[in-house]
Image: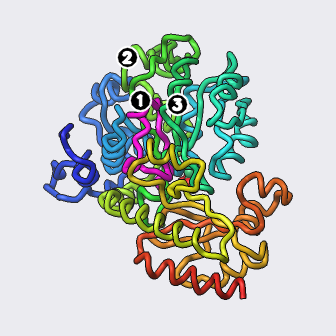
Amino acid sequence: MSDNWGFDTAAIHAGTAPDPATGARQVPIYQTTAYVFKDAAHAARLFGLQEVGYIYSRLTNPTVAALQARVAELEGGAGAVCCSSGHAAQIMALFPLMGPGRNIVASTRLYGGTITQFSQTIKRFGWGVKFVDLDDPQAVRAAVDDDTRAIFCESISNPGGYVTDIPAVARIADEVGLPLIVDNTLATPWLCKPIELGATLVVHSLTKYITGNGTVTGGVIVDSGRFDWSASGKFPSLSEPEPAYHGLKFHETFGALAYTFHGIAIGLRDLGMTMNPQAAHYTLMGIETLGLRMARHVENAQKVAEWLENDPRVTSVTYAGLASSPWNETARRVYPKGAGALFTFSIKGGYDAAVKLVDNLKLFSHVANLGDSRSLVIHSASTTHSQLTDEQKIAAGAGPDVVRLSIGIEDAADIIADLDQALAAATA
Ligand SMILES: *Cc1c(COP(=O)(O)O)cnc(C)c1O
């Protein structure tokens, strides 16, 4: 691996060499469950973590390993662990840090599914969450208590496309001695590298832009390798003897790779949220063009947002790339290549007009997904947020008149023409 490679070179080459067995240039899909040990001593060394190698595909697989190495390189991390979905990545990321009675401090501006996972499901593990506005440093400091084990945010957040000032949040995390976990799904490492900005861990839903074609679900956790897991005594899974590995201490033994090894040797082994090699193959195909796609995504999103903002049938547009956005200064400073390609807008005529707009769009697909090469739309109030009261919907940025767009990489003129004809039909 070369440290000097540019982003697009690394997106194609990092983590892969021609296949040593056959010379195959593309990464083979190693469709195998198990790997033959050289002899009994070799098997014993692998099981004892004294030697790194392949045992069983719930833990490691060469196709998945190539993807892990590539994402780690693109994010500037020490190591990465892939898993079956973005939501699996979030549980896997928290697992080594948490325990009953522990909590995380998380941003109020998160993907809806993450809010549900954090506010409902993790409670059953005895884990808690405190949601705070991460733009308010005092609120973050006030929320952290002795049981807090991490701070969690999204770089660019769903659904509004609001942006987080990662350097500012990382300074607070340093101050209070906690790891900062950044969900970088909407930005991808092409728009933002959270580790360079001070994050400890990065998680992704690979399902979205990184695969980029709406074919598979996947997730990944990237570790910066920089957090001192032994300093505070708050992370015994990483600093104390592990009974399931004859008292081995992960941090002492593996140093900067402690968290990554723990993710495989304990996380994947016991939680089993494994990525399969077929999914890794699709994601490796997608990632090769990540830089080209993201450049077009943000160029199109900026054009569409500006066009919508100037249209009299539209009340407001949330895109942080617009000069009118309260997040525009942060966007320019922290995300200089663009503010992503997901945002919402409000249409005159309320709920009825919003639903009519969605029904009249032809190029856009009405789906619960984002980050596809295709332009996508969803009316949150009648779908993802339909259980909420009107007041709650408005607070979540999903009021009755709000439509969420995920801008694809088609020709911008075609995207705008489709919105124009659907707006005409919806507001007639
Ligand atoms: C989709 C998404 C997730 C969840 O990922 P899955 O792959 O669907 O499990 C998490 N965070 C963000 C920002 C997302 O967009």
Residue at image mark 2: 253
Q: Residue at 51%, 78% (x, y): give it.
A: 416
Q: Nearer the viewer, mark 1 or mark 3?
A: 3
- In this picture, which residue range is highlighted in magenta? 185-206
Q: Earlier in the sequence, mark 2 or mark 3?
A: 3
Q: Secondary structure at mark 1?
A: helix
Q: Residue at 31%, 41% (x, y): give it.
A: 73
Quarter of the image for the N terminus: give it. Answer: top left
Foreground pick, 188 / 102: 188
Q: Which mark is residue 168?
A: 3
The answer to the question of whether label 2 and label 3 lie on touching residues, with beta carbons closer than 8 A, is no
- Location of residue 254 by image quarter: top left
- Density class for disc 3 (Cα within 10 Å; few <14, some 14-19, many ≥20) is some
Q: Label 1 CB, ligand 1: below 8 Å?
A: no
Q: Earlier in the sequence, mark 2 or mark 1?
A: 2
Foreground pick, 333 / 374: 333
Q: Earlier in the sequence, mark 1 or mark 3?
A: 3
Asked if the stretch drawn in magenta spans residue 194, the answer is: yes
Q: Is residue 203 left or right of residue 56?
A: right
